[in-house]
Image: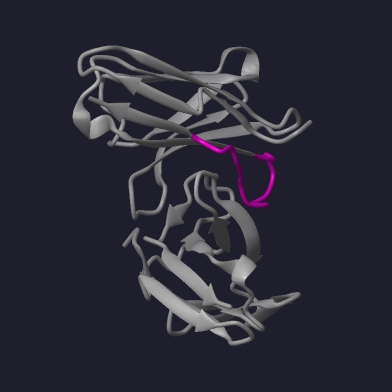
């Protein structure tokens, strides 16, 4: 029940295309869903996050879509750029909780 | 404040040796976390401090692992009698107390046990 399942494991997208990464969770107590971006040799960096009371959140080229009934959420990267090539992690936690559960990650490569 | 700082960045040690890592969080962050990340996986929770109190430890944190956060400032993670399975990236993160603003991670300490 503590798992966050992420797909795909890896993704290759042309420059200017849309990158889509999907995640599913089981624990309905989760109420905070962040996405992290990690470059080689660096720690993960918070990219964007959503709470389940909204179905979509957009920040620049990054959009989270959230489906509470299906217990699924996804990250869309519009106009993907080579600089977006990194590993992306979805995650989930409970408000007031201290433990964040991470997905296994998606390695994104954007071809120039 | 330049973010979360971790030292050393890399550590190679022989099996059976003890190692200690240090984390300096963002100064106004009350919460401090240690995570472990192995190749191709997401970070896994190890332990959590609220100020100087260690409030939770994962089952992943065996008796060979100990963490401290004296005076609620920097934290140390010690691994005694290291094993090859301890080889991983050890990540420290910090956050504000009251709400889930998300973590600020350090760049991690990569441990290799040979």
Q: Is residue B106 magenta?
A: yes
**Residue A11 visible from this viewpoint:** yes
Question: Which stretch did the figure color magenta?
Answer: B95-108
As displayed, is residue B37 above or below residue A33?
Answer: above
In screen coordinates, is B26 left or right of A101? right
- Identify the image quadrant of residue B2: top right
Q: Is residue B99 magenta?
A: yes
Pick out the residue farthest to the right: B1
Q: Quadrant of the C terminus of chain A?
A: bottom right
The residue under the point 38% across, 72% down is: A10
In screen coordinates, is A20 left or right of A70? right
As displayed, is residue B3 above or below residue A43?
Answer: above
| Residue B61 point in image, percent of width and height | 31, 30
- Identify the image quadrant of residue B83: top left
As displayed, is residue A1 above or below residue B46?
Answer: below
B10 and B26: which one is in front? B10
| Residue B46 point in image, percent of width and height | 39, 36
The residue under the point 50% across, 56% down is: A93
In screen coordinates, is B107 left or right of A103? right
| Residue A89 point in image, percent of width and height | 48, 61
A29 and A24: which one is in front? A24
As displayed, is residue A77 above or below residue B109?
Answer: below
Prevalent SS, magenta region: loop
In this figure, which colouring scheme has been used for the structure?
Answer: one colour
The residue under the point 33% across, 45% down is: B38
In screen coordinates, is B60 left or right of B55? left
């Amino acid at each position: 029940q503590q798992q966050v399942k992420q797909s795909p494991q890896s993704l290759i997208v042309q420059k200017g295309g849309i990158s889509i990464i999907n995640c599913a969770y089981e624990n309905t107590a989760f109420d905070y869903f962040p996405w992290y971006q990690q470059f080689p040799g660096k720690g993960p960096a918070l990219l964007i996050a959503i709470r389940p009371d909204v179905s979509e959140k957009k920040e620049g080229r990054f959009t989270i879509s959230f489906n509470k009934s299906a217990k699924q959420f996804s990250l869309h990267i519009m106009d993907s750029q080579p600089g977006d090539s990194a590993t992306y992690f979805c995650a989930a936690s409970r408000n007031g909780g201290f433990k964040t559960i991470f997905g296994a990650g998606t390695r994104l490569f954007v071809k120039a | 404040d330049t973010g979360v700082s971790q030292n050393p960045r890399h550590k190679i040690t022989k099996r059976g040796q003890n190692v200690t890592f240090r984390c300096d969080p963002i100064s106004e962050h009350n919460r401090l976390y240690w995570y472990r990340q192995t190749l191709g996986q997401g970070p896994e929770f190890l332990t959590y401090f609220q100020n100087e109190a260690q409030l939770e430890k994962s089952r992943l944190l065996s008796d060979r692992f100990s963490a401290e956060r004296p005076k609620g400032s920097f934290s140390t993670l010690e691994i005694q009698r290291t094993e090859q399975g301890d080889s991983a990236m050890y990540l420290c993160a910090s956050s504000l107390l009251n709400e889930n603003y998300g973590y600020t991670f350090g760049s991690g300490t990569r441990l290799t046990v040979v």
